[in-house]
Amino acid sequence: MTPFRYEIATGAVDAVSRAGRVDGAQFIAGGTSQVDLMKEGVQRPAVLVDIARIGLDEITDIDGGGLSIGANVRNSVASDHPAIQQRYPAIAEALHAGASQQIRNMASMAGNLLQRTRCLYLRDWAQHWNKRDTGSGCAAVDGFNRLHAVFGPAVHPGPVTLGAAALRAMGPQTCAAVLNAIMIRSRRSALYLPASNPRAVAKARTLPADVIILDLEDAVAPEAKDNARAAVIAAIVEGGFGDREIVVRVNGLQTPWGEADLEALASTPPQAVLIPKVASPGDLTAAAARAPRVPLWAMIEMPAAILHLGGIAAAPGLGALVMGCNDLAAELGATPGADRIPLHPALALTLAAARAHGLAALDGVFNAIEDEAGFAAEARQGAAFGFDGKTLIHPSQIDTCNAAFSPSPEQVANARAVVAAFDDPANAQLGAIRLDGRMVERLHLATAHRTLARA
């Protein structure tokens, strides 16, 4: 989670004023899923303005016979309100029947509406949306997928409610100091390891890579596929990987092993499954149907994938886009040099799709293991593009990769200066200030907070 400033609005005008100081401010509702989205780095607000105390709990008439419903009006109050029952009986009935009693009584109108429109899964109105029962279809039900809204089990007061009360009690300054110590999930280095090599898998538990990708595809010979799959399941069950994120790259569904891979991982899931040779959103739909509660990552290594990046990145349950530069170059007939110029459009488009849909984005591998200078240069290039990290083929590349995708001392110092400048009460009302001879806007403040979270 990136550090953020916590403010409490004293009224509607005050809330609007506070939000107006931040470029791109959004209205967000829904406690548990919002915290999850922030913990996973999907949303990285610089400021949260708490509007829980400002009212917004009234239902009033407006010109033309309509009703104004406050954001904090509970679903149960709205469903029982005489004006809503008389003028909009379908809405009253839907609010009453659409959720469990706990959720109906505790959820606000704004929270219910925004959860349902923000969560990609819930945009399919033909599907059951109250995810209180394990196995009811949403990949978020066990907490695997932070892109989904989570409706249950609903408990009030729950840990988020109590946590928010604690933050209010501490006050904004203490809150900011505490949250500065909380880090977002880091994916600077993602090391491919052959799942068929037990020594390599065992060594992974000691390596400083942020992500371990246990490979069932390219790194495993056809005759070893079944044994490698069993070894992956055993490794997941055994655990011992610490904070490292465990991802399994499966074989494609077009191969003899892909379906068995997904079915095995559906019952013993890693933190994500990497799907190779993705060409369209349909490939992810097919994979999700065989492992419905497992978060997916997508390999971008086919020309068709570049043409369908928007749809692929919008696929429900997706957490990351991973460049497969070797395969992509081969499919394109390109011969990239050290500057990778032929791949620049694909790299930029993939990153844009990831950012537009709140996904992580990882750069492709560097093949020349002993070319340390070449690897360092390519890692710096990936960081300059904006990638979160890079996939690796050898443990010797990890330290250099982690350094390339971590902020430099100069960047950290600059970020601290930006945060300190905007924390100055004299600048509280300003959208842009002068710092060290340059203009700094509040969008730079958000960047500074993200930099300090990664330091």
Image (tube, rainbow, N blue to C red):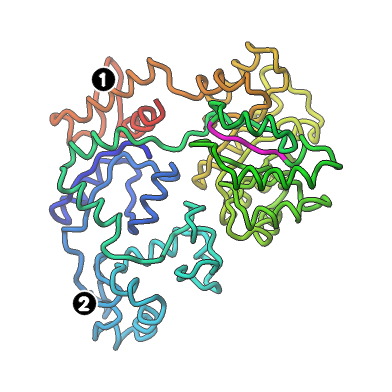
State the CA–CA distance, disc 1 to disc 2.
49 Å
Instruction: State the quadrant of the N terminus.
Output: top left
Taking depth in this image into account, of 65 and 198 the one nearest to the observer is: 198
Q: How many marks?
A: 2
149 and 331: which one is in front?
Answer: 149
Q: Give the range drawn in magenta.
A: 210-215
* Residue 363 visible here: no
| Residue 427 in the image, given as x and y percentages of width and height | 17, 30
Residue at coordinates 70% horizontally, 59% vertically from top-left?
286
Q: Does the magenta stretch include residue 214?
A: yes
- In the picture shown, does residue 170 fall above or below 51? above
Q: Name the residue under label 1.
A: 435
Predominant SS of the magenta segment: strand
- Label 2 belongs to which residue? 61
At 13% from the left edge and 52% from the top edge, which residue is drawn?
Answer: 10
> In the image, residue 224 lies at what x, y percent?
82, 41
- Residue 117 visible here: yes
305 up-or-down from 421: above or below: below
The quadrant of the picture occupied by the C terminus is: top left
- Name the mark on residue 170: none
Q: Position of residue 9 (x, y in %)?
A: 17, 51
What secondary structure is found at the residue carrying circle 2? Answer: strand
Element on which disc 1 rests = strand
Please identify the residue farthest to the bottom as the structure is shown: 86
Front position in the image: 384 or 179: 179
In the rendered image, which quarter is residue 153 located in?
bottom left
Left or right placement of residue 229 versus residue 294 in this view = right
Q: Tell me which amino acid carries mark 2.
A: Asp
